[in-house]
Amino acid sequence: MKRIYFALAGLLLVFAAAALITTASAFEGNILAQNQTQNQQQTQNPVTIRFTDNGETAIVTTYAETIACFLETADAAPALRHNDVVIPGLEHGITDGMHIEIIRAFPVHVRLNGHEQLLTFYARPGSILSAFVNELRLATDMDFTFDRAGWHRRLAAGDVVELESVIRLEREVYEFLEYTAEYTYCDELYFNQQELYRAGVLGVRRVETRALYIGNAVSEQAVLAYEIVSMPIPAVIRIGTALPPGHARAASGEIFTYARSVRMEATAYTLSFECTGRHPDHPLFGVTASGMMAQVGVVAVDTNVIPFHTQLYIEGYGFAVAGDRGGAIRGYKVDLYFNTREETIQFGRQNLRVWILLDEDAEI
């Protein structure tokens, strides 16, 4: 807002200077006319007039025919300032004994938008506050607001008038519109690897706004119109689906790492006497050879092939741990635990792929 203040102060000062130049130009025209008639004036009879300037009166003898010519040639008449009032008027002819009076404009100081620096202007004699502000509005083509309680207050020399500028700005700005991201899947990249396939492009929107500034603050602000100049283009990011060596996907979608995979003959067992040779009252009923309790996910293996506690993933069964062994389980065989006899019968005997995991990637 400081820039607005100084720009406005400059406009007001330019207006004051222009007014003085205009007055000077009028006098220059009168000087030419006076020079053309100078010889005639010297041959005319002088007239005596009463001349009052800002309350001080003197008796003056002159050859001038008009008040304008008199003021140009009279040594006792300082140059006119903008808003000085000449009675009866510059173009009025001079007659013997007439009274010419100049009522001088008086200085009024303007504090704009609370700024410390005061601007000085000369007000027309008898000006009231509203008339003075209206004259500033016309001269600067700008608007101001002030304390309306003093609307009809008559101004005096040296008064300080507090004004706030009223500026209405309509402007056109361009805004960027963010682009989104689209994801596609491909088997050309490993799982979870990402690649920027196409860079996004920002969109552009034209916005017409209007703001009202009163003094140093925004009083009102509104958006008049929007126009999409160009739509944003989304970025395209490819996500890999291929599994790197040593990785496989479980039926649940989980990815696990493995050291190797083998084909094994799979059978099924449960805690029934037919499978374990133990009744429920046996002290070791439900306890496996590794000391683990029998449950889904605990399988019997040949420990010469797969050691106890080895983590496994078994096709069609899921994650498991080597926790038991049996007399019939030799070599590449595995016995899978189920909760019911019916499930073991339904499973029967199958040839399945078994993955021996690197780490404890799965929990029972």
Image (cartoon, rainbow, N blue to C red):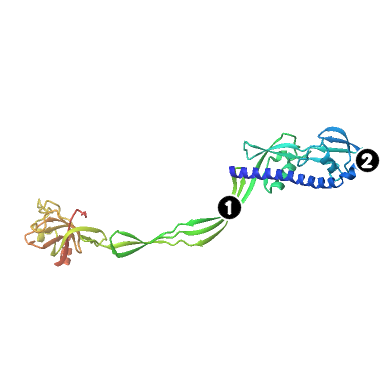
Q: Which three-letter amino acid code belongs to the residue tagged 2? A: Asn
Label total for image: 2
Question: Which residue lies under the disc numbered 2?
Answer: 45
On-image quarter of the C terminus: bottom left
Q: Is residue 4 visible?
A: yes
| Mark sitting earlier along the chain (1/2) | 2
> Is 274 or 54 nearer to us in this picture?
54
User: In x, y percent, where is residue 6?
Assistant: 62, 43
Q: Residue at x 41, y 60 (%)?
A: 200
Q: Is residue 363 above or below residue 127?
A: below
Closer to the eye: label 1 or 2:
2
- Per the image, label 1 sits on a secondary structure element best described as strand
Q: Residue at x 14, y 67 (%)?
A: 351
Q: Which three-letter amino acid code belongs to the residue tagged 1? A: Ala
In the rendered structure, the answer to whether residue 140 lies left or right of residue 349 reads right
Tell me if mark 2 has few (under 14), some (14-19) or many (20+) residues whose alpha carbon lies within 10 angstroms of its own. Answer: few
User: In x, y percent, where is residue 72?
Assistant: 82, 41
On-image quarter of the N terminus: top right
Question: Which residue lies under the disc numbered 1?
Answer: 222
Q: Is residue 348 visible?
A: no
Measured Cα–Cα span from mark 1 to mark 2: 72 Å
In the rendered structure, the answer to whether residue 267 lies left or right of residue 203 reads left
- Per the image, label 2 sits on a secondary structure element best described as loop
User: In x, y percent, where is residue 223?
Assistant: 57, 54
User: In x, y percent, where is residue 201?
Assistant: 44, 60
